[in-house]
Image (tube, helix red, strand yellow):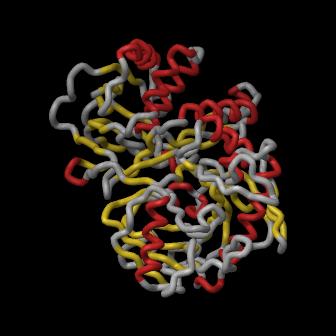
Amino acid sequence: MFLIRVTFLTGRVYSAVFEDGDSKSEPEWPPHPSRFFSALVSAWGESGAEEGLRPALEWLERQAPPVIHAGDCSPRKLVQAFVPVNDSSLLPEDRARKGRAFPSATLEYPEVHFEWTEAPPAELLPAFRQLLGRTGSLGHSASLVEAEIAESPPAPGRRVWHPFAVHGTRLRVPYEGRLEELITSHGRFQKSGNKVFRPSTGETTLYAEAAQARPEIRRSMFGSMIVLRRDCGPSASLRSSLSITSALRGAMMKLSPQPVPEFLSGHAPGSTPEAPLRSERPHVALVPLAHVGDPRGTGNVMGVAAVLPRTLNREEEKLCWEIFENIEELQMPWGKWCVSLCDAEERRKTLRQEVWAGRGSVWATVTPFVFDRFPRDPYGEEAEQTVRDAFVRVGLPAPAEIDLHYNPWLVGAFKASAYPPAAARQGKPQRYHCHVRARFEECIQGPVLAGAGRYYGYGLFLPVRDNGGRL
């Protein structure tokens, strides 16, 4: 066990819910593990970014989310203050003043404890002590703290929040690669001052008290997403999915180093246009992001995303980000789009990763599932088994129940016949596709892509309620 105690020296916390962006309205409590990790990274960077301390941060980001011991809090009345803006070269007295709110709360107990299951190697403990000793705030700079390795568990009376709950409060958590993301985002923001380079939300998980907690939730081989929004150009529906993902693939291949790496192209080494060799390694998938799943769902595509395999290493992920942040145009046969990287303040749910990376036990297709063989009965047992095998192939458990239909379960999606057929290999018959609803015996986490079309936008799923509708 590894236990860190953070003491709020004034008995109050100043921090805002991350999703509020600039319109801060309520304090964040308990502090999200990702916020604590960012505070450690900030303390490390501001004190010189010593390479000798970096392994401690890299060890911490690889751990499963911690258990949190914290008391309740009482939010204070929100008061607006007018302060000089920071993004100006003028002296503070000459700057324009802008209204700002600083959400805060009084704490029942001034301490919060983060508890990790695994203890770090002994050689990392001195590095952790240095990092914790340099961490002076958690949240706003007014949230003065003292952080240290705790030798004994917290006193009784605190609430104990466990990760991987079925229902509860969604908290941001660190993950492998988060340190490099923060370093890169900080460098780009310092250089340009553009808010698009603020750190992203990152990964999240549901926290709840012990009675509601559950073991770790299963995930597929797909992980983080790079989202591009449509800034201008003709509107298009999900029926244009193939042309949109084809245009995105073309832009990706054009900006990739040559020869194109296997994790981008999906082709094995030695592959040629005349004799293509399919890669057996997971590679980047491209998906359309459309307004579906609520009563006003239109099916209009609002953006596109690259879904990265979880098998990529740090350098491969970095290359993906460099490529997709430089894509500015997508040229389809029916028109051109101007696109840009989504920032952390994107408010439209369709373009937010956490919607597609949600959790649930029932999932339904946004775009049709493509079969790798033509079933004799398109809605029979053979077809259902093909779907089960496809989920297992991407690292998920086999669904307990499968429903197949030509009509979608999500409002805004189109019937299967409205989508162009997926490309077939030379000499092979046209692939069959239909809509799928899958019910699992356990809760799983997205993004979920399955079937023969998973790399080019087909077989994209969303979690749904048992009685229909998006979660």
Q: Which quadrant holds residue 8? A: top left
Please provide percent x and percent y for residue 415.
58, 85
**Left or right of 223: which side holds 400?**
left
Compared to residue 249, the image places residue 100 above or below, namely above
Please provide percent x and percent y for residue 205.
40, 49
Q: Is residue 147 visible?
A: yes
**Left or right of 111: which side holds 204?**
right
Residue shown at 54% from the left, 36% from the top: 177
Foreground residue among 389 and 438: 389
Quadrant of the rendering where the C terminus is positioned: bottom left
Residue shown at 33% from the left, 70% from the top: 400
Foreground residue among 212 and 422: 422
Residue shown at 48% from the left, 39% from the top: 175
**Left or right of 163: which side holds 431?**
right
Residue shown at 49% from the left, 27% from the top: 58
Please provide percent x and percent y for residue 153.
21, 27
